[in-house]
Image: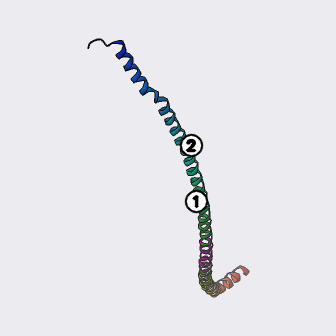
Amino acid sequence: MPPQTLTARVDSLEHQMESLVSVPAQLAQIESQILRLGSETKGEFAAIRGEMKAEFTAMRGETASEFAAVRGELRQGDEQTRQELRADMTSMEERLRSEMRTLNDDTRRHTLVLHEEVIARLTLLQEAAASNSTPTRRRRANRHKT
């Protein structure tokens, strides 16, 4: 490349400088856009945060009321179960008492029969002993007298 003249070099520099003159305005415009974007983003994030807070508050309230309803249903179910168990236990108690009375009556009858058998056997043994031992005792008593 041949060396440029001074005039050509100055013209080239002036041309380059003219294109750089618009750079500060362009930078200011970009800065303005960035600041506007920042404020819009901040506002949108604040709006989203507010919406989420409202939704979470509503969800918390719905959840609390649903849990309260479930607790109420559980209590009602528990009470119903308790009533059914009490009824079942009462019925079972009555059946057991009836069976115990029946078994007790059977045991008493059996005991009475055994008692009567023992009395009858004792009576037989006493009668047998009285009939067998009476003459023997008399004989023994007579022998000792003489």
Residue 31 located left or right of residue 12: right
Q: Where is residue 55 in the image (x, y as percent from the top left)?
A: 57, 57
- Cα–Cα gap, marks 2 and 1: 30 Å
Give me the disc on residue 39: 2
Q: How crowded is mark 2: few (under 14 residues within 10 Å), some or many (20 or more)?
A: few
Badge 1 marks a residue whose secondary structure is: helix
Residue at position x 70%, y 83% in the image: 142
Residue 107 located left or right of residue 27: right
Quadrant location of residue 63? Answer: bottom right
Q: Out of 40 and 80, give the one closest to the viewer.
A: 40
Residue 7 located left or right of residue 145: left
Q: Main secondary structure of the magenta part?
A: helix
Residue 53 part of the magenta-drawn span: no
Q: Out of 114 and 48, give the one closest to the viewer.
A: 48
Quadrant location of residue 58? Answer: bottom right
Count of picture labels: 2
Q: Where is residue 57 in the image (x, y as percent from the top left)?
A: 61, 57
Quadrant location of residue 81? Answer: bottom right
Residues marked 2 and 1 touching at CB (< 8 Å) = no
Residue at position x 54%, y 42% in the image: 36
Image height check: is 99 above or below 74? below
Give me the disc on residue 59: 1
Residue at position x 41%, y 21% in the image: 14
Disc 2 or disc 1, which is closer to the eye?
2
The residue type indicated by label 2 comes to: Ser
Q: Out of 125 and 26, give the one closest to the viewer.
A: 26
Magenta extent: 77-92
The C terminus lies in quadrant: bottom right
Q: Out of 78 and 143, give the one closest to the viewer.
A: 78
Residue 84 part of the magenta-drawn span: yes
